[in-house]
Image: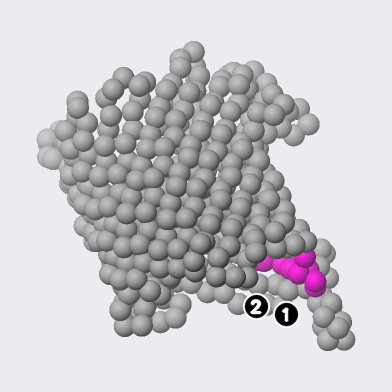
Amino acid sequence: MRTDFLNKTLVIAALLLSTVFPFSSAADEKEGSSPTLDMEATASFWWTIHEQVQNGLTQQGSGDRAADHASGFAFRHGRIAFILGSPKGDLQLLLRIRLEERTDIVDFYGGWLPAQYFTIYIGQMKIPSTSEVLTAYNDLDFASRSTFGRKVGDYSLTRTPYISSVMAAKSYDRDLGLAIKGSWPGNRPWDIRWFLMVGNGMGANRYIGGRENEEFLYTNSLGDMYYGGRLEITPVHWVTAGMHASSNQHDNFALGDRGPVMDIDRSVWSADITVGHPHTPRIYGFYGAGGMDDYFDAQQYLYDYSGWGLQGVWPMLKGRLEFALRFDRFVSESGRDGNETTRDNWTAGINWSPLENLRLQLNYVSKETTNEFESDIDDNILYMNFQFDFDTNILR
């Protein structure tokens, strides 16, 4: 089933490429009137060497205790992308397909690029967030993002930490909407970059539509949307400071023509700083906080969360070998009752790139969860990420 879907998607992509930007003759290419087509492919496979999974389960009948460790292989991350450009470079169309978990479209948007300080995109794309979240998975210094980084996209959009009909709705940090990006002056040791977006606020592959186009969300009030923005400043070429904020409010929306009728009210902000370059010693730190004021199934749900982290990477052997260390904390509180849950993670990692398109990441994560009413469970993990990364120019 997944293979059939992927084949159909690739056929549709090929037809789209040939109809929107017809292939030009050799004479046209000499005149610079040929479109461009690039392809990107990444894949990550995890080997969970040893993970603690304290569970307290027993086998029915024999009473044998269940295994409390996990070990094995997993398909963690897979992407195939096609990027189409107009002959003059002022139009762009991107299609990115996600292969892990289930096969579907994760990014699909068109862009108009009239000037460096003003580019406009419409479609499904990443929302404004921290620098860590906006960094592509295959460029991360660690095999996993921080706890805040893994949750901020979901909690900015519709996923709930409490039991609800959308508690398992992953956003993949994407939403369907309209975005404006730009930079100024962009060609000096310092510059300023911005990213503004308005979207549905529902997450990837979930849309808003009434009787004409019924989808995930059936009704919402005019102006009830996701609004987000990010600003980055590079005062010198080796330092970048960024900040982001977003609001996602939908009052009295209906999930279907028979309901239920619900409210979501989400807001979050963050600030981060990066010192260094990809192939030099570098430090990254962030802090962020958000909250929810939702109304589901005749109950009000209040949820506040915050997170911060600091990490450093030290490259050796001309950048092919790197040592990395990170601490990150995630604090959450339900109902504003004063009972906070604190999750502290120490992550130690080694990154090795024996070949240009291959990277191996060995990470050990030591986890500690503190809660007034619950004891800490054993959930440390040692795992390895095998990262393959390719890109090529199909048409120039």
Is disc 1 placed on a helix, strand or loop?
A: loop
Is disc 2 placed on a helix, strand or loop?
A: strand
Residue 294 percent coordinates (x, y): 49, 23
**Residue at 51% across, 62% down:** 235
The mark total stands at 2
Q: What stretch is highlighted in magenta?
A: 82-91
Residue furthest to the top = 298
Q: Which of 61 and 386 is in front in this view?
A: 386
Give amino acid for label 2.
Answer: Asn
Instruction: Report the residue marked by disc 1.
Output: 396
Q: Verify whether residue 18 appears in magenta.
A: no
Give amino acid for label 1.
Answer: Arg
Check whether the beta carbons of the residues at disc 2 and disc 1 lie within 8 A of each other.
yes
| Mark seen at residue 393 | 2
Left or right, 188 with respect to 314, comes to: right
Q: Which of 70 and 355 is in front in this view?
A: 355
Query: In the picture shown, does residue 252 fall above or below 121?
Result: above
The colour scheme is one colour
On the rendered image, what quadrant is the C terminus found in? bottom right
Residue 208 appears in which quarter of the rendering? top right
Q: Which of 51 and 144 is in front in this view?
A: 144
Left or right, 122 with respect to 149, comes to: right
Residue 351 appears in which quarter of the rendering? bottom left
Residue 184 appears in which quarter of the rendering? bottom right
Circle 2 Cα neighbour tier, 10 Å, few/some/many (<14 / 14–19 / ≥20): few
